[in-house]
Structure formats: C-alpha cells, structure tokens
Amino acid sequence: GTWSQHWGVSTSSQENWIASMAKHLSEKFYQAMTKLEPRYPQRKALILPALHQAQAEFGWLPPEVLDEVAEYIGVHSAQIREVASFYTMYNLKPVGKMHLKICTNVACCLRGADELMEFAEKKLGIKCGETTADGRFTLSEEECLGACTVAPAMMANDDYVENLDINRFNEFLEKVKK
C-alpha cells in the first residue's frame, strides 16, 4: 500500500504536516530571490546569492536554513552543504556580531600577520576560530583576501581593514566597541 495506508496517516494529515513545516527564511529572502531569478539561466545558479542572502538574515547558515535553501532551489541539501562548506565566506556555525578574518597568506605573513593574530587572540581573550563570551567578536584565519598590496589585511564582516599593524588593530577595536 501507500505510505499513508502503511502508517495509518490520512492524506490530509500529510498535507497538514507539510504545510506546518516551519519556514525559517523571511519574506524578504523570497522577494530578493524572485528579483534575481530572471538574471540566471538555471535555478542552480542561485545557490551563491541565496546562501549570501540567507546568511545576511541569520549571521550564519544553520542546517535547517541550508535545507530550506535547497528546497527553494530544487536541489538536494547535500549540494547546498557542499557549496557552503567550500567557500570560507559562508559561516556554518554561529559567529559574533563582528567577524574578524585576518589573512595569513604569504604576503600578509611577511608583513606581520602571524604576530597580529597572536595579538588579536590576546586582546580579545580567545583563540583563532572562537567567539568572545559576549558574542561580539569571532576571530578567524583567512587563506587569502586578495589584498596583498595592502598587507597585512583583515576583513571585519564585509569591510576590508588594510595595512594593519597592532596599533591600527587597537584603533579599529576601540572604534567598533563604541
């Protein structure tokens, strides 16, 4: 027999269950995606912008949000997880209000990024990959920010902070703590 006969669930119960599945993404998300759809030849091409928009709402990408993005685009949730885990710009665990990503690639390291990371860890009282207890800051290492000519560089959420040294890092922290 059918699934509903086997488990003794009526079709209307199934429909009610499906309808009651919580939506996590806002109407704003769906409106943004509707605007973008005509720009892309295939729906799969919406994966990156959809992840970006979803992360803008939550600050990170919880598993249930990844599932909802997959459902919206019409692909298996594993495909969405593969993409989200490949790109470092997507956060698969909660991050602080200010996500500090210090570049530790060659150009930045030659100009002091390692010392800067050590200082940032001490100043914030956390290790790389951790978030402060108050949830304000997450400190991460970034492989390359493409800002070699202004090394060392850091991204603070979506903004670049360039020619960074310990003094500039301190000034930056004082400014954002206000």
Image (spheres, rainbow, N blue to C red):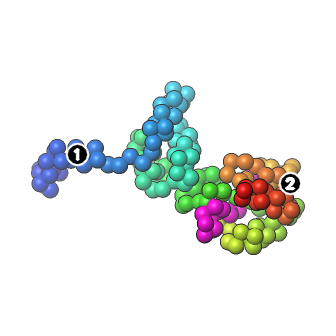
Q: Is residue 5 above or below residue 50?
A: below
Task: Give how far across and how far down residue 122 sits, in percent.
Answer: 75, 73
Task: Work out which residue is located at the far front of the displayed protein and give it.
Answer: 178
Work out how far the residue at label 1 is from the one at label 2, CA to CA, in angstroms: 57 Å
Front-most of residues 151 and 175: 175
As drawn, is 91 to the left or to the right of 113?
left
Total of numbered circles in the picture?
Answer: 2
Residue 2 visible in the snapshot: no
Q: Is residue 7 above or below residue 33?
A: below
> Residue 57: within the magenta?
no
Q: Residue at x 17, y 51 (%)?
A: 3
Q: Mark 2 or mark 1, which is nearer the start of the sequence? A: 1
Mark 1 falls on what kind of element?
A: helix
User: Which circle marks residue 73 in the picture?
Assistant: none
As drawn, is 12 to the left or to the right of 31?
left
Q: Residue at x 72, y 56 (%)?
A: 178
Point out the stretch of residues depicted in magenta. Answer: 130-145
User: Which circle marks residue 163 in the picture?
Assistant: 2
Q: Residue at x 63, y 51 (%)?
A: 89
Task: Give how far across and how far down residue 21 sits, in percent.
Answer: 32, 49
Residue 59 visible in the snapshot: yes
As drawn, is 61 to the left or to the right of 112?
left
Kind of residue at disc 2: Asn
> Residue 140: within the magenta?
yes
Kind of residue at disc 1: Asn
Q: Main secondary structure of the magenta part?
A: loop
Front-most of residues 5 and 26: 26
Q: Quadrant of residue 60?
A: bottom right
The residue carrying mark 1 is 16
